Amino acid sequence: MRFKIPQYIDTEDKLIWSISIKQFLYLVACAGVLILLWTQLTYKAFLIISAPIALFFLALAFYKINGQPLLKMIAAIFTYYSQPKTYVWKRKNKRIE
C-alpha cells in the first residue's frame, strides 16, 4: 500500500501576497500600535516614536538571521544572558594502585 508523504513540512502556509499568517499578524499588530500612537500623540512625536516601532515590527516579520526568525534569536539572546555562566570544575580523585 502506498502512502503520500508530505514534502514541504518546514515551510509555512502563505496567506496573501506570499506572506505567511505569522508575518501578516505582525503587520496587523504594527498597524494597530501605529494607529494607537497616531490618536494619542502630536505629529512630530508620532514621527519620532513610530519609526523605530515600525522598523522593529517589519524586522520581526521579514528579517531572518541564518535562516532563523528574529523572534527566535531575541529569545536565544535573553536565554543566554539570563542563565548563569560560571562553571565550577570538580576534580575527581582517582586512586592508582
Image (cartoon, helix red, strand yellow):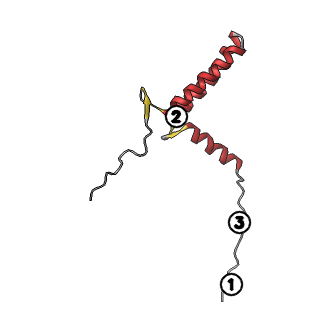
* Pointers 2 and 1 in contact (C-beta within 8 Å): no
Quadrant containing the C terminus is: bottom right
Q: Is residue 85 placed above or below 20 in the rendered structure?
A: below
**What is the number of the mark on residue 22?**
2
The image shows residue 77 at horizontal and vertical percentages of 64, 43
Camera-nearest residue between 58 and 5? 5
Residue farthest toward the front in the current orientation of the protein: 1
Cα separation between marks 3 and 2: 44 Å
Foreground: disc 2 or disc 1:
2
Q: Amino acid at mark 3?
A: Trp
The image shows residue 17 at horizontal and vertical percentages of 42, 26
Q: How would you rate the neighbour count of disc 2 (Cα within 10 Å): few for under 14, some for 14-19, many for 20 or more?
A: some
Residue 73 as seen in the image, left or right of residue 3: right
Q: Mark 1 = which residue?
A: 95
- Residue shown at 35%/47% (left/top)? 7
Q: Amino acid at mark 1?
A: Arg
Cα separation between marks 1 and 3: 19 Å
